[in-house]
Amino acid sequence: MMKVCMKIEDFNAWYGQNHVVKDVNLEVYTNQITAIIGPSGCGKSTFIRCLNRLHELIPGARTKGRVFLDGEDIYGANVDAADLRRRVGMVFQKPNPFPTMSIFDNVAVGLRLHGIPSGTTVEEVVERCLKMVGLWKEVKDRLHVSGAGLSGGQQQRLCIARALAVEPEVLLMDEPCSALDPVSTLKIEELVKELKEKYTIVMVTHNMHQAARVADYTAFFLEGRLIEYGATADIFTNPKDRRTEEYITGRFG
Ligand SMILES: Nc1ncnc2c1ncn2[C@@H]1O[C@H](COP(=O)(O)OP(=O)(O)OP(=O)(O)O)[C@@H](O)[C@H]1O
């Protein structure tokens, strides 16, 4: 039996009157990569932004339902949203290092906010995280220059290092490769596969080949609903729902 990291129950999300996530039930498994696929506008980004409560920061946005992380409802009254977002980190479509900060400070910024774990130093954490994302050798001699001078792929790895520095349990990735060239994309995919040893990963992708290459589980969304969810191999080779089949064979979307 797979261990459940996040359990999403009867979950709905709105922007004003616009109901964009509808009655979703899904279990995200620990130390697995879960891909969220579906046509543009089906609610993929909105859905993952509900998993660390970023959605509620948008004026007029609303949710209904429950999301459990290690058995605790993240929408519960006692949950501190800032602490939740430390535990459930996020990497965005476009690499977004803080442009005025050095490479070092980009990784250290969350630590300064959330506190440095005892028994370690900021320098150690920064080095460890940059090594984890395969960036250390490339940047160790220029840690104190701006991260804005890095290539797109390097910037995205820097953003992943920034997310890892605060020791999340879950990493949400919203089309992390869509702004990258094919070589950088493959590097990020390899990195994601390594990271699942330590983290649980939920990744939105519009690229079905990417889902097939990296994800253990795949969830297919259509018009805000979860149509089908299962082991990636099953979704791609033996989909149960006609709509999943039409989508993965490229007949729509
Ligand atoms: N900030 C917002 N305010 C109002 N409506 C929004 C906002 N963001 C998204 N929407 C709407 O919510 C719906 C779902 O959008 P969402 O971005 O979650 O879809 P998606 O599947 O991630 O799409 P894409 O693949 O194009 O990124 C769309 O109809 C979109 O127009």
Image (cartoon, rainbow, N blue to C red):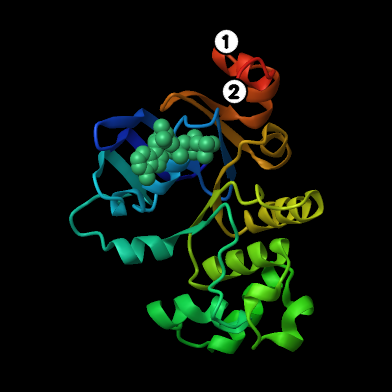
Q: Residue furthest left?
A: 77
Residue 205 % position (x, y): 60, 40
Q: Is residue 229 above or below residue 62?
A: above
Q: Is residue 78 above or below residue 128?
A: above
Q: Tag 1, which secondary structure?
A: helix
| Label whose residue precedes the other's in the sequence (2 or 1) | 1
Residue 91 % position (x, y): 54, 57
In front of the other: 251 or 80 = 251
Check disc 1 and report the residue beneath it. Answer: 242
Name the disc covering residue 139, or none. none
Q: Tell me: 230 left or right of 47.
A: right
Q: Is residue 152 above or below residue 207?
A: below
Residue 26 % position (x, y): 43, 33
Residue lying at 53% horizontally and 73% vertically, measured from the top left: 98
Ligand 1 occupies quarter: top left
Residue lying at 66% horizontally and 21% vertically, measured from the top left: 248
Let me know if residue 195 appears in the view.
yes
